[in-house]
Amino acid sequence: MKVLNSKNIKKMDFDALIIGGGGSGLRASLELAKSGLNTAVVSKVFPTRSHTVSAQGGITCAIQSADPNDDWKWHMFDTVKGSDYIGDQDAIEYMCAEGPKAVFELEHMGLPFSRTESGRIYQRPFGGQSKDFGKGGQAARTCAAADRTGHALLHTLYQNNVKEGTNFFNEWFAVDLVTNQNGEITGVIAFSVETGEVSYLRSEATVLATGGAGRIYASTTNALINTGDGLGMSLRAGFPAQDMEMWQFHPTGIHGAGSLVTEGCRGEGGYLVNGDGERFMERYAPNAKDLAGRDVVARSMVLEIIEGRGCGPNKDHVHLKLDHLGEDVLNSKLPGICELSKTFAGVDPVYKPIPVVPTCHYMMGGAPTNIHGQVFHQTNGTEAPIQGLFSVGEAACVSVHGANRLGGNSLLDLVVFGRAAGKHINEDLKSGGGVAYANEDDIDKSLERLNCLNESSEGYEVGEVKRELQDVMQKYFGVFRRGEFMEKGTKMLVDIREKTNNLYLKDKSESFNTNRVEALELQNLLEVAEATAISALERTESRGAHARDDYPERDDKNWLCHSLYDPSQKKLKKRDVNFKPQTMEPFPPKVRAY
Amino acid sequence: MIEVSIYRYNPETDKFPYMQKFEFTPPEREIMVLELLTLLKEEDPTLSFRRSCREGVCGSDGMSINGKNSLACITPLSDVLQKNKIDLRPLPGLPVIRDLVVDMTEFYNQYEKIKPFLQNDQPHPEKERLQSPEERSKLDGLYECILCACCSTSCPSFWWNPDKFVGPAALLQAYRFIADTRDTRTEERLESISDPFSVYRCHGIMNCVNVCPKGLNPNKAIGEIKKTLLLRKESGNELIAKSGGT
C-alpha cells in the first residue's frame, strides 16, 4: 500500500464540519445549512443508522401539556439533583429554559409526537421528575412519540437536512483531527469507507458529534457503532476529557441481549420485582419507588441480585412487570418494547415480565464544553477554548448530566446544544472568526495512525483485543467499584494499549473495508476506556453513577467538582462546577433522596 | 455443525462474485444471524457487511437470508436454518459494493424524490401545531419505516425500474406526508407522482408486505395513494364537466 502523506491525498474546504450524523450533529448541521455556510456532515453510517434512533421513551421538557403549571425551573431542579450536584447550573438552566423552543421546533419540522385529547404533545412520567422543586410529587414531563421518540426525532432531523440541502459524507470515517502550529483545529483526516479514498477535510469549525462509547463495556444498550471516535480523536490530540468515571447503567437492559427497555415502561406504571415476587424498590426509594434516579434503581437491582434475591435459575436478573397495564396500553404506548421483548427475551409483556439487568447505557462525561459547544482545555491552571473545536451531544460534557443523567434529558441535550453550537458557529464565522492553515507536517502527523495500520504485517487480532478490553471494563468498572480491583483493571489496560498499538490489519483492500474501520474504532475505545479507568480510580468518593464500596459516601469537601482527565500526563485534575445560573439563585448541594 | 454459504465479492480481487462455504458450530444459546456473521468475521476479517443498532431499529443489516429479505440482527438463526444450511446474499436488485454491502444510492434517491419532510405554508404557531389523537393515528404504520430497503429490493417492479418507480419504501413515506394533517402540499405531492411509473408500476405483488421486518404495509399505503389520485382525477373531471356544461 502506498504511504499516505499531505501531497498524495485529496483536500476539500468547508466553513463547518460536523463529525457524526446523529441527533446533535444533525441539529447543528441544520442550523448551519440554513444560515448558508458551506457545511458538511461526516458520518460513518447513513445518518438514520446513528444511535439516536434507538432512544425510546422521550424528550423531557416543560412544555406545559400534561401540566399547564409546569415550570422549566422545576425541571432544572430535578436535573441538578439528578446530577448529584456536579452538573453545571448555567448549562442546565439554559437547556431547561430553551428546551420548549427547541421541542416546538421539532414539532414544526414534522416530528410525529403522540398527542393528548386536546391535540397537544403527549407527556409521560419519567424517573427523577417532580413538581414544585421536589415538593409536589411526580411530574409527567417527557414528550413522546410512542416508544420510538429517538427514531422519530432522528428521521425528522435527517429529513429537514435533506430539505435544506446539507452536504453529507455518508459512510465516511474520521480518523484524526488536524492541529496547526497555533494549536487550532483545522478539520480532520477522513476516508470514504466505500472507496477507501483518504481526504483532508479542512474546516474553520470542526464539531465532534460522535456520540457515546458504550462499547467499552461487554454488556451495553449501545449500538455496535458507539465507539467514542470523537473523544478518541481529541484525547489523542492531547485534549482533556471531563467526568469520564460517570457512566450510566440503565436499570432495564434485556438480560443477555442488552437491548434497552425504556424507563417509560415504569413511567406508564410498570415496576420491578425480585425473585421473591417483591416490589423491592419500595424499600430503597419509598417515595419515588421505581421512578427514582437511574443510578439508585440500578444499584438497588444489583444489591438484590448479590443478596440472592434475583430471578431465574441463576438468580442473575430481576423482572420488569408490565402485564397489569393491559394489552391496549402496551400496544398503544409501548409497541416497540413489546416487539423487542418478544425478539430478544422470548417474552410477550402482555402476559409475562421481562427479564432485565442494569446495562451500560450512557456516557455522562466527554469533551468539556461551554453552552456554545466550544471545547476547553486547561494550561497552567487557566482555561481557554481550543480554537476551531466544538463538541455536542453525548460526546460532549457541557455538563448538564453531571454524575447521573435523568431519562429523557439526552434527547433534549442533543437538540438544545446542537442548535446552540450551530448558532454560535454561524455568528462567529460571519464576524470574521476562523482558523489558520495547517502545514504539511501537521497533516502528515494526523495520517500516522492510518499509515501504521496499513503497513502492519503482524500483530494482534482486532476482535480478540476488543473482547479483552470489554471484559476488563465490565469486570472492574461496573455498577459497583473498588480501588484494588480498579487498580488491577487499570494495569491490564496498559497491556491492552500495547496491543491496540500493534494491531494486525489483515484486510488491506480499499473498498468497504470494515476490518480497517473496526481497528480504528478499537483504538478509540481504548482511549475512552483508559480515561474512564484513571478517572474512576482517582475519584475517591461515591457520587451519582460512580459508586465505590471502599468510599461509599459522597465527599463534597473534596469532590464537589468535575474531574478533568489529562491524556498527556494520564492524570486527573479538578475543575469547578458552575453554580451561577443567569436568572435565578443556584441550587445548593443537598442529600439526594428519592 | 451448520453450513453457511455467503456471497463474496471484492471488486479489487474478484472478477466474479462467488459463494463461500463456512462450517460453523453455533453456540448453544439462541443467536441471531448478525451474531453468526460477527463470529465468522473473527475467523475471516475480510468479510464485509453493514450493522449498527443490532436490535432492528436502524435498518443497516438488510440482506437476503435463505432467499428472503430480512434484518440479520432480529432473525434468529434457528428460525431460518434449512437442513442445517443457511444462505446469505446481498439485497437483490441493487449494485453490490462488496460481499453483503449494496450500493443504496437509487433507493435513497427515490426517498429524496418524494420530498420526505413536512411542508406547511402557514406561519408556525408559538407552541406546537395541534393534532388530535385520531389524526395522529393516521401516521401509525407509516412513520416507523427504518429505510432498510428490504421491501423495495424484494419488489420486481423496483428491480425493473429503480430510477422511475418510486418503490414501496419511499411510497410509504410519500403517503406518510399525504396523511399528515399538518402538511399543506398534498396536491403538489400527488401531482409529482401521478405519472405512469412513480406509483402505477406497483402491481400489488405484495412482496413488500411479506418481508417488512417492522410489520408495515407499504401495499396498503400505495393503495391509499392510488385511491386518492383517482378521486382527485374524478373530482377534476367533474369540474371540467361542470364548466363545460355552462
Image: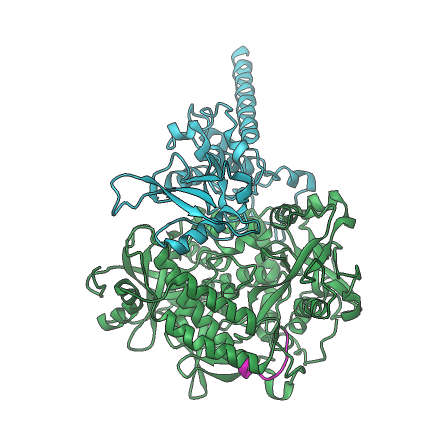
Image quadrant of residue A257? Answer: bottom right
Q: Is residue B212 left or right of residue A270?
A: left
Asked if residue A37 is among those painted magenta in the image, a careful observer would answer: no
Colouring used for the render: by chain
Residue sitting at x 27%, y 45%: B11
Q: Position of residue A370 (x, y in %)?
A: 50, 73
- Please, which residue is most extreme toward the top here? B245
Residue sitting at x 34%, y 38%: B95
Residue sitting at x 64%, y 47%: A346
Pick whichever, B235 or A99, lies toward us: A99
Q: Is residue A543 left or right of residue B56?
A: right
Marker count (numbered) = 0
Magenta span of residues: A537-544
Q: Main secondary structure of the magenta part?
A: loop
Task: Let me know if residue A317 appears in the view.
Answer: yes
Pick whichever, A386 or B149, lies toward us: B149
In the figure, A318 relative to B5: above or below?
Answer: below
Q: Quadrant of the C terminus of chain A?
A: bottom right
Residue sitting at x 54%, y 81%: A537
In the figure, B199 relative to A458: above or below?
Answer: above
In the figure, A383 relative to A71: above or below?
Answer: below
In the figure, A229 relative to B44: above or below?
Answer: below
Q: Quadrant of the N terminus of chain A?
A: bottom left
Pick whichever, A10 or A355, lies toward us: A355
Find chain B in the image and tell me its colour: cyan
Q: Position of residue B148 (x, y in %)?
A: 48, 42
Find chain A in the image and tell me its colour: green
Q: Position of residue A315 (x, y in %)?
A: 70, 62
Asked if residue A538 is among those painted magenta in the image, a careful observer would answer: yes
Q: Position of residue A252 (x, y in %)?
A: 65, 59
Task: Let me know if residue A390 appears in the view.
Answer: no
